Each structure stands twice: as structure tokens, then as C-alpha cells.
Image (spheres, rainbow, N blue to C red):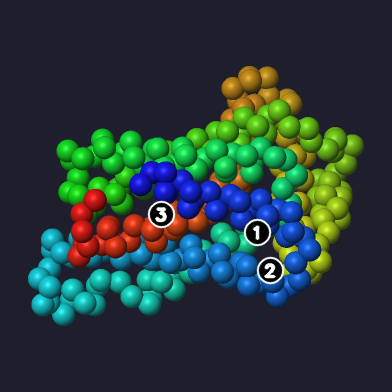
Amino acid sequence: MALNDMLWLLTVPVFLIVLSRVGVLLPDTAVAVLVLGLALFMTAGIWLRLVLRRRIFLAGALRAESPWYRRLRGGPLMALVALGGAIPLAAILVVAMARVDAPHLLLGMVLNVPVLVLLREFWSRRLASHAVPRFRAMLALRLALALNLGLLFLALAVAALFRTYPELSGLTLAEAMLSEAGRQEATSGLLQALMQLAAAKDAMAWWLGQQVLPGVIDPGLQVAGWMVLVATDLLVVWSYLLICASVLTVLHWRAWHPGGHRE
């Protein structure tokens, strides 16, 4: 089962690698469809996991014949709320892939696949004597995602310390942001505008890193400062992990559902 999960999850970084190569060539319609498609897939996973947790709770709290059981089990409103959060995350991921200029992020996503599966298996075994079978798989996935998020963010923060950045010390903050935004090119006007916003954000972080952080003598504080500056990368990592979680949720939905068989 673990090997099967890895093979399915590998489709996510492979897709993102292809997107990093062709993203800037896509027209507006393709970009919009891509963002919406990724958002809907994220929403499917989020909604299914929310429904599962809600129904597990209701199964122990309410009788099945109660009208409140049907009203509270999760429906279109829950899905719409999830979609509202998934659309910006999907857009952030598409923009990040279109702008990626270093292999470490894509390599980290590929290497993360076995890490995520192994972490989920580890927590599933650790929880075997504590959680009921139908809730153990979901709880193991949540713990694996949380730990994975921390590991990936730490890896990005360390990589950020050793990257080469444009020299911005002779520019004002506004000049630095405009300069980096002007470097962004894409066939899609929508994608280009989003890439320019992301580039301006990066330029602000780089400018602060070059103008403010060098004055901090304590190396520990410098590292902490850089981690704050790259904190926005958490959204990219979280978007990627949500897609991975959605793949696992769709694969195992029948086994995880309260009415399905037990793992």
C-alpha cells in the first residue's frame, strides 16, 4: 500500500515540474482553468476529510434517525467554504511554479513523497493502540502533514541562507520592487500580473534582508529574521501538501469512511 501511495503521489511533483517549464507559455484561459482545476481538487480532499471527521463525531454523538444528523453531516456550504480557501492557494502554487528559478524546491517536492508516506505509516502504527481504526488513518495523515510542513519550511529556510540574491543595496525599496516586477514575463496577462506581485514581494524581502538584517550581530537572530522573510513560502509548501493530501484522501476514501471497511 505504501508503494502504491508513493507512485500516485509522484504524479504531483511531476505535474508541477512540467508546469514550471510551460507555465509562462499558457494563455489566460488555460491559467484560469488550471487554477480552478487545482482548487477543485484541493477542495475535494479538504471537503472529504471534513465530512469524514464530522460523520465520525456525529456517529458517536447523535442517533442516525435524528434530523440533526443529516443537517450537520456536511454539504455544499462546507464545500464552498473550502473552495474559497483553495482558490488563492492554487493561484499561489501556479505562480510559484511559473517563477521557480532554483531546482531545490522541485527536488524537495520529489524527495518529500516517500517522506510523507513513511511519516503517515509511522504515525498510523504509533496511534494503533490509542485511536479507533476509522479515525486512526485521518489522524495519522494530519500529523504527517504537520510534521512535513515544518520539515519543508526548515529546508527552504536553510536553502534561502545560501542562495545568491540580486544586489539591491543601492536601490530604494520602491526601486527594488519595481525592478524585480519588471523582469517577469508570461504569455498570460493574468499570470504576468500575479508574477509581478510575487516578484515585488520577494524584492521587498531581499531588500530588507540586505538593508536591515546585516545590522543584526547575533547569528541566531539573523537566521530567525530570514525565516520570517521566507515565511510566505509556507503557503506554497502548504498548497503542495494539500494536493498530496487530496490524492491520498481520494485513494483511501472508501476505507476511511465510517461505513467502509477497516484498514
Estimate how packed mark 2 is, as few (under 14), some (14 to 19) or many (20 or more) residues with alpha carbons within 10 Å.
many
In the displayed structure image, the side of residue 117 where residue 21 appears, left or right: right
Decide: is 111 above or below 55: above
Q: Earlier in the sequence, mark 1 or mark 2?
A: 2
Estimate how packed mark 1 is, as few (under 14), some (14 to 19) or many (20 or more) residues with alpha carbons within 10 Å.
many
**Residue 149 seen anywhere in this rendered image of the structure:** no
Residue at 32 percent across and 44 percent down: it is 140
As rendered, which of 110 and 35 lies closer to the eye? 110
Q: Residue furthest right?
A: 170
Q: CA distance from mark 1 to mark 2?
A: 8 Å
As rendered, which of 261 and 42 lies closer to the eye? 261
Q: Position of residue 192 (x, y in %)?
A: 78, 63
Q: Determine which residue is flagged by label 2.
A: 31
Q: Determine which residue is flagged by label 3.
A: 248
Q: Earlier in the sequence, mark 2 or mark 3?
A: 2
Estimate how packed mark 3 is, as few (under 14), some (14 to 19) or many (20 or more) residues with alpha carbons within 10 Å.
some
Q: Earlier in the sequence, mark 1 or mark 3?
A: 1
Q: Is label 1 in contact with label 3 (beta carbons under 8 Å)?
A: no
Q: Is label 1 in contact with label 2 (beta carbons under 8 Å)?
A: yes
Residue 94, label in figure: 1
